[in-house]
């Protein structure tokens, strides 16, 4: 049994074990869930301590109209061994907390500014993992070399001049087919006219709540474009992110705004509110 556990209490009668799993999977890989519906409590075991630490960030939130208390018997520390990322793969628990918060918003969940600020502060205190930084830099450099030549980054190219950024990005993409072959959101985003801004969001700890909302809108738009393609598969942000199948995010609430510009499309029910 994993030692990286969190305890959740005050759970609503309407919340199912699948709802809990869907919700906390954004924090990182879950090894097991122990849910006592009669006591309205759950213990969730994560594979990594950083995932448990991210889950604690959501303490005080609401799920299905009930305020959640999220605690742990021990302090969880981020472990960054500095090892290089696996080619084409980055784990959810290695991502910046602000990036994870943006994913929540993009999928239709509602997070309060207090929770978003908490995510920003955690990134400032602990920094961005070396594994994730290596992943982003490798993508940027590899795409740049393939499309533009040696010692070029794709995010730098499309942002050389603001006025022609969109035209440059489109020309490079049409010529090299970057977007068609990109394996995840990060590769496509770095190749977009906002490549430099996206890279700065994920590699810098200096950001504001509005930056998270802005990135959430980019993710949501990318999902919308991906799902509208005839052969597209609905995947998460990066290869380890939770899927965006509308049947997965099935937690309901009456307080989530249906017109949220950062909400994902195609949901059959509304998403929970975390405040």
Image (cartoon, helix red, strand yellow):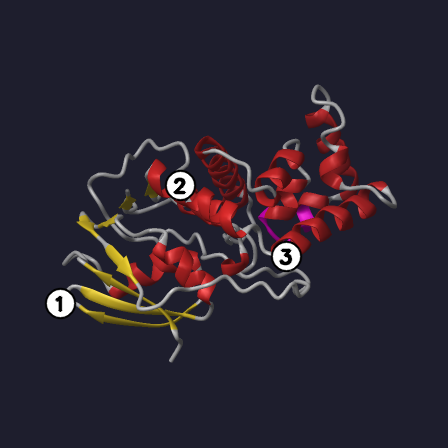
Q: Residue 39 carries which label?
A: 1
* N-term mark: 2 or 3: 2
Residue 265 visible, this angle: no
**Could you say where residue 81 lies in the image, as x and y percent from the top left?**
62, 66
**Could you say where residue 124 lies in the image, as x and y percent from the top left?**
51, 45
- Is residue 116 shown in magenta? no
Extent of the magenta region: 180-185
In the image, taking residue 21 as reference, residue 13 lies left or right, namely: left
Query: Which of 12 and 251 lies nearest the eye of the viewer?
Result: 12
Real-space CA distance between mark 1 and mark 2, rounded to the nearest whole angstrom: 29 Å
Residue 90 visible, this angle: yes
The furthest residue to the top: 163
**Could you say where residue 105 lies in the image, as x and y percent from the top left?**
40, 42
**Which residue: 44% across, 61% down?**
51
Rendered view: 246 above or below 159: below
Q: Quadrant of the N terminus?
A: bottom left
Q: What residue sits right under mark 3 in the picture?
A: 130
Q: Residue 178 carries which label?
A: none
In the image, taking residue 157 as reference, residue 128 lies left or right, namely: left
* N-term mark: 3 or 1: 1
- Is residue 184 shown in magenta? yes
Kindly state the secondary structure of the residue where label 2 is placed: helix
**Which residue: 50% across, 60% down?**
93
Report if the CB atoms under discs 1 and 2 are less than 8 Å apart.
no
Kindly state the secondary structure of the residue where label 3 is placed: helix
Q: What residue sits right under mark 2 in the picture?
A: 116
**Could you say where residue 189 lies in the image, as x and y percent from the top left?**
62, 41
Query: Which of 221 and 47 lies nearest the eye of the viewer?
Result: 47
């Amino acid at each position: 049994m994993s030692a990286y556990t969190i305890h959740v209490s005050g759970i609503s009668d309407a919340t199912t074990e699948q709802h809990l799993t869907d919700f906390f999977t954004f924090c990182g890989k879950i090894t097991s869930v122990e849910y006592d519906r009669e006591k309205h409590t759950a213990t969730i075991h994560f594979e990594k301590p950083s995932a448990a630490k991210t889950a604690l960030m959501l303490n005080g939130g609401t799920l299905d109209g009930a305020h959640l208390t999220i605690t742990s018997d021990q302090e969880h520390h981020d472990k960054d061994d500095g090892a290089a990322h696996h080619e084409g793969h980055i784990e959810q628990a290695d991502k910046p907390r602000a990036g994870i918060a943006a994913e929540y918003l993009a999928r239709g969940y509602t997070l309060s500014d207090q929770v978003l600020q908490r995510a920003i502060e955690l990134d400032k205190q602990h920094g961005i993992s070396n594994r994730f930084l290596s992943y982003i830099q490798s993508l940027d450099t590899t795409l740049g070399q393939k499309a533009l030549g040696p010692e070029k980054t794709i995010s730098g190219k499309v942002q050389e001049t603001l006025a022609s950024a969109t035209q440059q990005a489109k020309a490079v993409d049409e010529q090299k087919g970057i977007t068609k072959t990109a394996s995840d959101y990060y590769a496509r985003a770095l190749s977009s006219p906002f490549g430099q801004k996206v890279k700065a969001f994920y590699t810098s700890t200096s950001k504001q709540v509005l930056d998270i909302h802005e990135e959430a809108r980019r993710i949501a738009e990318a999902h919308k474009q991906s799902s509208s393609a005839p052969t597209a598969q609905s995947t998460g942000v990066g290869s380890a992110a939770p899927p965006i199948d509308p049947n997965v995010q099935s937690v309901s609430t009456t307080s989530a705004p249906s017109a949220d510009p950062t909400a994902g499309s195609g949901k059959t029910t509304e998403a929970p509110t975390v405040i």
